[in-house]
Amino acid sequence: MIEEKELQKRIADVVRACGEIILHADRNKSCIDEKEGHANFVTAYDKRIQQKLQKELLQILPEAVFVGEEEDIHASIAKGYAFIVDPIDGTTNFIKDYHMSVISVGLTLDGERYMGVVYNPYLNEMFTAIRGQGAYLNGESIHVSEEPLSNGLVLFGTAPYYEELGKRSFEMAYDYFRRALDVRRSGSAALDLCSVAAGRAEVFFELCLSPWDFAAGALLVEEAGGRVTTAEGEKLTMHKMCSLLATNGREE
């Protein structure tokens, strides 16, 4: 077995190389397809990056299973190692050249969050975490904010693929808006989780996410000293879609 820090470095190197694909993408040749749900897109670049991640990550850790967003059938992550990957989190942003997209790679062990790597190629920001060893941005330790909600920013996702959740999402956002400094919507759950981990915001919530959206980011928040549960306050599961609430631990 590769030593933990070396394993993380190799994963991060693969992810950084995939970031170059995003930076040099020709959006005129993105070959955009629609998936089930409102405004749910996949591009040729999502598929290309996922294929590269699958090939190269499994070369690093052959005993792992691979779970990617752009797969129709997903392997069980209950035993052993599993890579849980979103090749481009923020695909709509990528299509619109909005520069708010990241590559997210989570590694679980026996179904529990173990290692996380999230890379924003536009800002060259590499977020990394190993369970029990803290969270880092470009090698420097990061921590959640110590500010109360009244002096905080709230990030949220609108669960756009599930139109029945739209009204409730904005009602929650408005409630937070009245109690916090302001609210923000980036279009990338993984990026928002990194922002909470780095102390740039105090809260993030979304009412329906898949494990590849938060496999890496949730660990980053926890290792930075924050708290992650479902929106109902229950333990976050890595096995199915669920809501998510991430805070700096000082939520009211």
Image (cartoon, grey):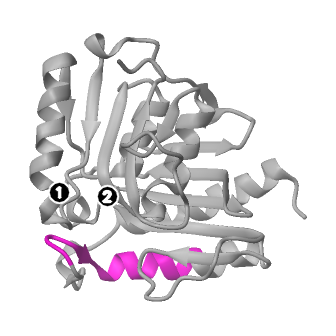
38 relative to 147 in the view: left or right: left
From the viewer's side, name the closer residue of 88 and 63.
63
For label 1, count other residues whose C-alpha is less than 10 Å away and answer few (under 14), some (14-19) or many (20+). some
Q: Which residue is mark 2?
A: 208
Q: Classify mark 2: helix, strand or loop.
A: strand
- The residue shown at (52%, 36%) is 221
CB within 8 Å, label 2 to label 1? yes
In the rendered structure, does residue 44 fall within the stretch colored magenta? yes
Mark 2: which amino acid? Cys
- Answer whether residue 137 is visible to the viewer in this image: no
Residue 78 within the segment the image draws in magenta: no
- Could you tell me which quadrant the C terminus lies in? top left
What residue is shown with label 1? 165
Q: Position of residue 45 (x, y in %)?
A: 35, 77
**What range is drawn magenta here?**
37-53
Which residue type carries mark 1?
A: Leu
Which comes sooner in the sequence, label 2 or label 1? Answer: 1
Rendered position, 83 above or below 235: below
Q: Residue 1 in the image: x percent, y percent? A: 90, 64
Residue lying farthest to the right in this orientation: 1
Residue at left offset 47%, top offset 42%: 229
Q: Residue at x 13, y 20 (%)?
A: 178
Q: Quadrant of residue 199?
A: top left
Residue 186: which disc? Answer: none
Residue 30: x and y, percent? 24, 80
Residue 152 to residue 245: above or below? above
The image shows residue 36, relative to residue 211, as above or below, that is below
Q: Residue 119: percent from the left, percent from the top?
A: 48, 51
